[in-house]
Amino acid sequence: MALFWMIFTGILLAVLQAQLIGRFALRGVRYSRRFDRERCHAGEDLELIEVIENDKKLPIPWLRLESEFPSVFRFRGQKSVKMAVGSVYQTHTSGFALMPRRRVTRRHFITCEGRGIFKLSTVFMTAGDLLGFMERSRSEHVGSPLIVYPKLLDQARMPYEWRSWQGEFAVRRWIMDDPFMIEGSREYAPGDPMNRIDWKASARTGGLQVYRQGHSADPYVMIVLDIGQVVVGLQGGGGEAEAEHVISLAATCASQLIADGVPVGFTHNAHTLSAQRIPPGGGSAHHQLLMEAMAGIRLHKRRSLADCLIAETEERGVSRDYIVITSADSTEIRQASKRLERLGHKVVTINPVEAAAPPRAREAKDSVYSALRKEAGA
């Protein structure tokens, strides 16, 4: 008889705990997560912060959280976390046990290996009683967007066409004076025109002084990116790595020009989750806009490069320097480039697959630009 009552009591307690704990397992459970920053470059480390709170008087013996993350996210140092990694997404599963009125904070360290605009918004939660007789599940909507910019390249990996254009661009900026930009005064030199004499400074110093003029305003630069031929999902290639390199090259060019104070615009011929064309501009806010546009590029061609250049011929405004990043060469592309040049623009083509020039060739070409600078200053 004692054994019967022990079995009966055990069954009764199991049913009671299933009804109390299992039925209300997810009641009062709050979940939130966020990244330590909303923007980063590919290859950088991030911290994902999860907060789970049990706001009721009953404990939660076990709670399982399942989330989907892009496969380009690499979780580091997570021995207690199960992950099923696919070609596009990976399932991140973690478990908790929460006492009444408790809050748990977990930090996951992630390395973002690829660019993109990610909207991570759904978490699937499952909890139950101590013996697993009853389970409750629900999906939780959490807003944790993340924008991963393209990875910036080292200067040694930049093609020599980019270095050559930079040297020519620097010479053009340096030798052209802007009559409306006055940076101070200097002593009069033979050959200075009389209309540049600064009479106030001359009277103050006792010697003839002329206005020291700044260089001309930087011309506008438009970066035109050709996504190329990409077969997404093809094992062992398909042009994805080449396309990502082209995007990183464009991002590096834009970042360097913005840092030098040059107004930069961007356009491309691919499908995108962001802006298709951004007019030239400068400053940190514009740089962020450019990086976001490059992060949103999808590896699928929307139109040909020739059509992209022809569309630029319809844009009105001041003359611009066009940097066309492509490995393609066709009659249509050359004709579209000539149309831009006839409108007063300058067009330079950068082949992303060509390595930087060898040191001797680089020194030889750099000496040419040094000679040009000396000749201009003579």
Image (tube, rainbow, N blue to C red):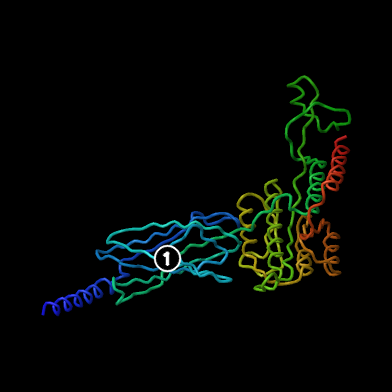
Observer-nearest of 67 and 145: 67
Amino acid type, residue under disc 1 in the picture: Ser
Residue 339 quadrant: bottom right
Observer-nearest of 162 and 65: 65
Q: Please, is residue 308 above or below residue 34 in the view?
A: below
Residue 140: horizontal and vertical position, in percent? Answer: 41, 69
Residue 232: horizontal and vertical position, in percent? Answer: 66, 72
**Residue furthest top in the image:** 206
Residue 239 quadrant: bottom right
Residue 168: horizontal and vertical position, in percent? Answer: 82, 48
Residue 256: horizontal and vertical position, in percent? Answer: 70, 49
**Residue furthest left in the image:** 1
Q: Please, is residue 378 above or below residue 173 in the view?
A: above
Identify the residue shown where x is 14% and y is 80%: 4
In the image, taking residue 162 as reference, residue 91 lies left or right, namely: left
Q: Please, is residue 134 above or below residue 221 in the view?
A: below
Graded by Cα atoms within 10 Å as few (under 14), some (14 to 19) or many (20 or more), the crowding at tag 1 reads some
In the image, taking residue 197 as reference, residue 69 lies left or right, namely: left
Please, what secondary structure does the residue beneath circle 1 have? Answer: strand
Q: Quadrant location of the C terminus?
A: top right
In the image, taking residue 153 as reference, residue 120 lies left or right, namely: left
Q: Quadrant location of the N terminus?
A: bottom left
Looking at the rendered structure, the number of numbered marks drawn on it comes to: 1
Instruction: Report the residue marked by disc 1.
Output: 94
Identify the residue shown where x is 71% and y is 57%: 249
